[in-house]
Amino acid sequence: MKLMICMDDTDNLESKGTGWLVEDACREMTAMGWGRYSMISRHQLFVHPDIPYTSHNSSMVFTADTDVPGETYANFLSAYLEKNSAPGSDPGLCIAHEPANGTREALVSFGLRAKKEVLTKDEAYALARTLGVHLSEHGGTGGGIIGALAGIGLRLWGNDGRFRGWFHLGRDGEIVSADKLLAFESVETIRTPDGSAVPDDAHIAISDQLKTICMNGRSTLLVHPAGSDGVHRVLCKQELKRY
């Protein structure tokens, strides 16, 4: 069974971010033998004066391959959020089974809207009830439920967000073959920003810190098209901020 899980708005300006909290929860669940967990993706939502957020208004999503019932996850993560979320935060939790087409389309639509519209808790709860998705608030205003539901939709869409963590696979400026990078389990594919695939024998100039994005549902390392020297170069940290 595959579950999709998203948390949002668990931090304040002095605390560690939501990504850290999600990562810690995954470590605890792994220690309990509950299943295998995917990489955590970060999804940027609409930044607007009418939307309260800590610093960036982003939600964190992961998937779980597990035999543990969704209700058990909901009980554990609800208690985890209530215990560990920062004072003044507005935590929200969403848990969904990997959905069929109609449910998937509705979730994706909500996620895409949350990147450009001010949505309400009532809208989020109404959609969750209709789709049979777990959605719960765990402190403060509970406004994080909007981002939690939206994050599930954006992860399902498969073309939004950056994966948590920086990878160190070589020295800054070192030229590495694409197939060597693809041997690293967190790099599923290498593409240019327009989605064009990069051959396995391509030469890529890397940085000392690499990050992947979600493209076509896969953990993707983005590189610029090859220059006149035949070498591709990874996108820098600033360039990746738009994903």
Image (cartoon, rainbow, N blue to C red):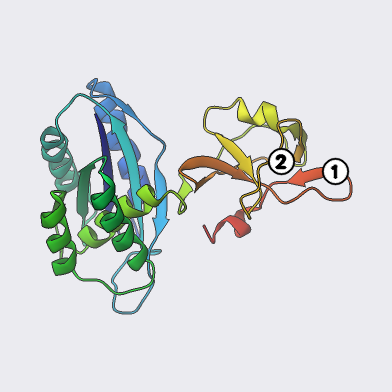
Q: Percent from the top left, x then y, of residue 175?
A: 78, 36
Q: Is residue 42 above or below residue 207?
A: below
Q: Which sits in the foreground, 132 or 90?
A: 132
Q: For the residue marked with disc 2, what is the amino acid?
A: Ile
Q: Is residue 115 above or below residue 158?
A: below
Q: For the residue marked with disc 1, what is the amino acid?
A: Gly
Mark closest to the chain's N terminus, 2 or 1: 2
Quadrant of the snapshot with the N terminus: top left
Which residue reaches farthest top?
33
Q: In whole angstroms, how far apart are the C-alphas of marks 2 and 1? A: 14 Å
Residue at 42 percent across and 37 percent down: it is 39
Q: Percent from the top left, x then y, of residue 183?
A: 61, 25
Tag 1's secondary structure? loop
Residue at mark 1: 230
Residue 16 in sight: no
Residue at 70 percent across and 33 percent down: it is 178
Residue at 22 percent across and 50 percent down: it is 85
Determine whether label 2 and label 1 are within 8 Å by CB.
no
Which residue reaches farthest right?
229
